[in-house]
Image: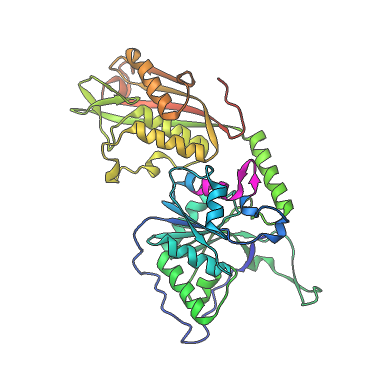
Amino acid sequence: MARRSRLSPPPSPSSESEAMAISSDALPSPGGNVAILVAAGQGLRAGPGVLKQFRSVGGVPLLARTVRAFAASGEVVRAVLVVPDPKEARSRLSGWLPADLPVAYARGGATRQDSTAAGLEVAEAAEIVLVHDGVRPFVDVQLIRRVVGAAKEWGAAVPVVPVRETLKRLDARGAIVETVDRQAYALAQTPQGFRREILQKALEWARACGRVGTDEAEIVEQSGMPVARVEGMETNLKITTPSDFAMAERILGADSAAGALRVGIGYDVHALVPGRPLILGGLSIPHSTGPAGHSDGDLICHAAADAMLGAAGLPDIGQLFPDTHPAYRGASSLSLLEAVSRRVAQAGFGLVNLDLVLVAEAPRLVPHLSAMRINLARALACAPERIGIKGKRGEGLSFEGRNEGMAAHAVALLIRDGGTPQP
């Protein structure tokens, strides 16, 4: 169950010795964003058997599902799994974790604070640290991005959802004392985001003062730092009891029944300039001009990638592979499409089919279509029959018809894991 959070300013430290200097304008550490997934509990309320973080939900270990959500978001460069026994965790999660997100392990401590501190030590250099319950597998890309953005701006952020039921205050015997104004409260969730140095200093302050919080945001609040709130998710379920496992299976079952098929649209356009190679569908085609761009300018791959990312609900290629990053200067768009395919698979989707149209006055594409389809099929690990590519002329109209540029359109159909793509 989510922690109830009071929507009021955090209390000031009660003494000068407790008020450690935790600067909100300290320079962030380099190293990108890191997710610390805390899954070090024994899960006694989940009942006997395998620890709940390793139990299957929809055929996938619970903790692995959570890691996949962060990998698919594109917002973190690595993850730290805080678990009771790293050796056991490696064994149970072997083969289930995404291939392109580095994962490290840390041994949990006696309290959540201790576990978070252990994960933070392994995380090392990071800009933003996202601390998340390892048993909240339904966190989505939008929530992760909201928390990261608020943490970058404010230094600390926590997602909350409103209290929708009437709220009662009880005494020590469990008797109702009063009805509380629920508008002043909210339920706290994870991931909670922090600039690394702020979380580090807050944990050090808590250890020095003997303070123990129910989550990381409380410790940061108590240390005197403000914590921004962002909109949480009603479906961001923390799996604790057997009934929660049953609910998770129902959520996955509803997804597979009502949302098994997903459609995405992609579009890309480039101006044509002399001296640039013309690369389309991973194929170099002799031509007097080529598309201007930061990468190799392969419009077909760009449109295909955005169609697939859109269908999976993931950030577009401009966010995943920004044209301001030197690593992508002259990059092979076919390789980027392959990376997109892996990310889409990590999000739980497979490709049913992909259909593309390139609008250009020249050159003629017909002699090259078969080779393009084979290239795309290899990048997407599918049969060429799943891919359609067509060339259309601009007929003298607009920039395509005047040979000033090219445009590519794509439609992708994805199916959620557990479905069966048609041949």
- On screen, residue 135 versus residue 398, left or right, reads right
Task: Tell me residue 9's x, y (percent).
Answer: 54, 73
Q: Position of residue 274 (x, y in %)?
A: 18, 27
Residue extending farthest top:
367
User: Does the magenta segment cover residue 96?
Assistant: no
Color scheme of the displayed model: rainbow
Question: What residue is shown at x 25% (from left), y 32% (from top)?
Answer: 292
Instruction: Out of 370 and 111, give the one closest to the viewer.
Output: 111
Point out the image quarter for the C terminus. top right
Q: Quadrant of residue 22?
A: bottom left
Residue 193: x percent and y percent? 48, 61
Which residue sits at x=66%, y=54%? Answer: 239
Counting labels gives 0
Q: Is residue 217 visible?
A: no
User: What residue is rendered at 20% in x and 21% in y?
Assistant: 288
Above or below, 247 against 6 in this view is above
The quadrant where residue 32 appears:
bottom left
- Occupied quadrant, residue 56: top right
Residue in the image at 37% along x and 41% along y: 318
- In the displayed structure, does residue 30 sit left or right of residue 155? left
Rendered location of residue 74, percent (x, y) = 44, 46
Residue at the left extreme of this rendering: 275
Q: Is residue 12 above or below residue 61?
A: below
97, above or below 106, in the image: above
Residue 284 appears in the picture as rendered: yes
Stretch in magenta? 55-70
Q: Is residue 82 left or right of residue 126?
A: right
